[in-house]
Image: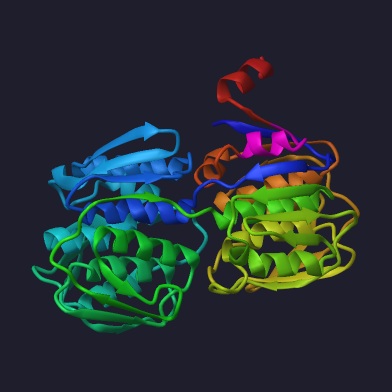
Amino acid sequence: MDTLRIVGGRELRGRIVTPGAKNSCLKLLAMSIMASDECVISNVPQVTDVDTMCKLLEALGAKVSNTGPGEVRVDPTTIVSADPPDPLVRKMRASVQVLGPLLARFGEVKMPFPGGCAIGSRPIDLHLRGLSAMGAQVSEEHGYIIVRAPRLVGAEIHLDFPSVGATENLMAAACLASGTTIIRNAAREPEIVDEQNFLVRLGADIRGAGTDTIKVTGVKSLGSTNYSVMPDRIQAGTYMIAAAATRGDVTVTGVVPEHLDALAAKLAETGAAVICSEDSVRVAMGDRPVPIAVKSMPYPGFPTDLQAPIAAYLTVCRGTSTITENIFSNRFRYVDELARMGAHVGVDGRTAIIRGVNELTGARVVAPDLRAGAALVIAGLMARGETTLDGTAHILRGYDDVHGKLASCGGDVELVSDSASAAAAE
């Protein structure tokens, strides 16, 4: 496995361009299954999760090709299977997003339960319950989900929780259903809006994305489109936190600033200067952060995907901060790794209590999941001395050239290949 070598103590200064959003791109690729012709998706981030989704589509029979930097062409007309293969499905949580599109197109899907980062229970019961309301029959056999619906019909669905994944799957499936589907208590994340825009470009009849009620009137077929993925607000937010953590001055460009309002408000609370313009956010910090309280919430609240990165930043605050995780049940797996670097973090149920220390020190640590990995990168940038971060495969699932972007702003960050590490050890 590759490792990240980080020498801390350097202020980040410069500009970082935000790539396309992984959490949107994966769903757009899945939704292209329902198109009647080729789809060209641009502003595609170069992350391994996208590679996995492309391989999943190819395994189903689609023709997938890279037609330029950050551009993927999908021809779904050659798809012959509605049975996604085990290894790819178990590798990535977002693989569940092919369920709705495959069911809408083929009327039957058999797939294993999806995998991904072990950040707590993420059942897909809301997905299945919504599909059942639309006329699907759901069963489980030997670890496989089997969903059958020769014809999906419109229904009124109330989600018990505004699940992003369930909203996306049901919105996609409803596009080719007979009649009108209304999804209440729908997720409001910007990625939902991006997916609505993509589907509308394909010919779907959808309204309400970005609100808690989405109305989808089924159509007989969908066409094709060229579409550019929205900016990645989580990558952008991570670099904003890194700027404050290193007491630097970084402008993150190519963003939608209002997507980052919750984070910007919290960084300002810690004492950072946050300046928003039309398509960029500048963050500057000159001192240790003031302690704050953070609670992860569905959008437009503070994003759960930035909970771990901001926790790393707060380990050097002047006092005691608290972080409450309201989305996932096991998202504090980074705490033990931060402790190796000198952080004082205790966990009580869903709340982490962070007692700020003067500084962190470099250590060898392991990324247990994607966003925890981002937190440990930030900790390494702050720490005195050198940090060696293993488990980089998690980070590369969701961050496009993270080491290159940080190095361009003065960070001493290097991705060291396994072969190079072995040679150095000898």
Left or right: 10, with 197 as reference point: right
Residue 403 in magenta stretch: yes
Give the answer, above or below, for where 298 lies relative to 26.
below
Of residues 155 and 222, the one drawn nearer to the viewer in this rendering: 222
Horizontal and vertical percent for residue 287? 90, 56
Left or right: 377, with 124 as reference point: right
What residue is at 76 percent from the left and 56 percent from the top?
A: 313
Give the answer, above or below, for where 67 lies relative to 18.
above
What residue is at 63 percent from the left and 15 percent from the top?
A: 423
The quarter of the displayed image where residue 304 is located: bottom right
Of residues 214 and 247, the one drawn nearer to the viewer in this rendering: 214
* Residue 131 visible: yes
Horizontal and vertical percent for residue 3? 62, 33
What residue is at 54 percent from the left and 46 percent from the top?
A: 19
- Quadrant of the image containing the N terminus: top right
Picture mark count: 0
Which residue appears farthest toward the left when viewing the image?
A: 150
Of residues 309 and 115, the one drawn nearer to the viewer in this rendering: 309
Q: Which residues are magenta?
A: 402-413
- Quadrant of the image containing the C terminus: top right
The quarter of the displayed image where residue 286 is located: bottom right
